[in-house]
Image: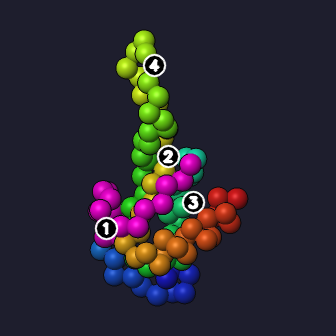
Amino acid sequence: MLKHGEINPLNVHDLRRLDWCPPHFERIILDQMSDPKVLTDWIYENLEGRFYLGPIDVKVSDHTDLRSDKKYFNRQTLIAFELASEGSYFSLCLPNITA
């Protein structure tokens, strides 16, 4: 962890934050778009494993307008962790992070 002065090899080789979300990662979807810098700073300081952070479009409802083919989507933030325990810890601390 960065705040304890420990060097993480994933950070040194820039392999910690992924550009794509592997299917085996533990996923957390945030309803609102949060500041990604605040989230990534907290993750780098408090966690050790690999993670993904990025936007995702989630279908709000299956309701479609009869006059058009519109589907309703909402942009949200997806955070995924390789270690499920880090996802649980992040979820517990989330109210303090986004406050």
Viewer-proximal residue, 58 or 95? 58
- Kindly identify which residue carries mark 4: 65
Considering the numbered disc 3 on the image, is that residue within a helix, a strand or a loop? helix
Q: Amino acid at mark 3?
A: Val
The residues bearing labels 1 and 3 have C-alpha atoms spaced at a distance of: 25 Å
Q: Amino acid at mark 4?
A: Asp
- Kindly identify which residue carries mark 1: 24
Residue 29 locus on image (x, y percent): 49, 55
Are there few (<14), some (14-19), or many (20+) residues within 10 Å of tag 2?
some
The residues bearing labels 1 and 2 have C-alpha atoms spaced at a distance of: 20 Å
**Of the two numbered discs 2 and 3 in the rendering, the one whose residue sits closer to the viewer:** 2
Considering the numbered disc 4 on the image, is that residue within a helix, a strand or a loop? loop
Q: Is residue 73 visible?
A: no
Task: Please give the label number shown on residue 51.
Answer: none
The residues bearing labels 2 and 4 have C-alpha atoms spaced at a distance of: 23 Å
Q: Which residues are magenta?
A: 15-31
Q: Image check: 70 left or right of 29?
A: left
The residues bearing labels 3 and 4 have C-alpha atoms spaced at a distance of: 38 Å
